[in-house]
Image (cartoon, rainbow, N blue to C red):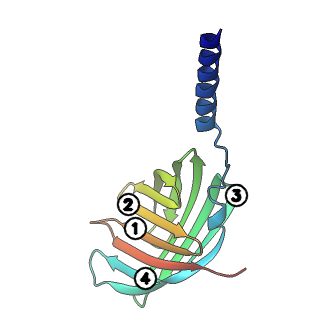
Amino acid sequence: MALKLSAARIGIGAACLVLAGIFPSRAEPVFDDLSGAWSGIGTMKPSDGPREKVRCKVAYNVTRPGRSLTLDLRCASDAYKMVLSANIEQSGTELSGNWFESEYRQGGKVYGTNKDGLIEARIEGNTVAALVTIQTRSNHQSFLMEAPGSWMAEVAIELNKEAR
């Protein structure tokens, strides 16, 4: 009888662990902390020119609580301008969506992950591929896009969330 009870307890314990992995005990919004306006400064490095200081604004709009967002990024220096928009969906930690840059008329797909405030993504288009890393901690965010050989080889920005 004691052996059957122990086996039942182990079985229940294992079932609880499996369910805990499927349904986290603390459901945490995935994109909700990004929502709002962010601004900051950084640098842009075009493939055919010197690195330039830029001013940037980013607006994140959560369109489906925690799981879907739009991003509008605008950066400008004395010589360059970049206007990037994206629609991103999240399933588990996996990201997917599309992007479009209107100044250079480039667009394509987004693939990546979002874990613990770190977004790591790859953006691809017909003529460009880039790696994007977005690290968010409270009201501060680092945005890095690296696209060696493309029209804009690197964009590195430090952003702060604007007060509502």
Mark nearer the N terminus (3 vs 4): 4
**Percent of width and height locating residue 15:** 62, 26
Identity of the residue drawn at 51% across and 62% down: 100
Query: Closer to the camera, 58 or 119?
Result: 119
> Foreground: 103 or 39?
39
Question: Could you tell me which secondary element the residue under label 1 belongs to?
Answer: strand
Query: Mark 1 — residue?
Result: 145
What's the CA distance linking mark 3 and mark 1?
A: 24 Å
> Given the image, on which type of amino acid does mark 1 rest?
Met
Give the mark nearest the N terminus, 2 or 4. Answer: 4
- Are the two marked residues, 1 and 2, in contact with CB atoms closer than 8 angstroms? yes
Q: Residue furthest top?
A: 1
Residue at mark 4 to residue at mark 1: CA–CA distance: 12 Å
**Who comes first in sequence, dot 3 or dot 2?**
3
Q: Which residue is mark 3?
A: 63
Q: Quadrant of residue 45?
A: bottom left
Which type of secondary structure does the marked residue at label 2 adopt? strand
What's the residue type where badge 3 is placed?
Answer: Thr
Q: Residue type at mark 4?
A: Gly
Mark 3–mark 4 distance (CA, rounded to whole Å): 28 Å
Label 4 or label 1, whichever comes before in sequence order: 4
> Which residue was labeled with disc 4?
42
Question: Does the CB distance between marks 3 and 1 fall below 8 Å?
Answer: no
- Label 2 is placed on what type of residue? Leu
Expressed as whole percent of the image width and height from the top left, the position of residue 160 reads: 56, 80
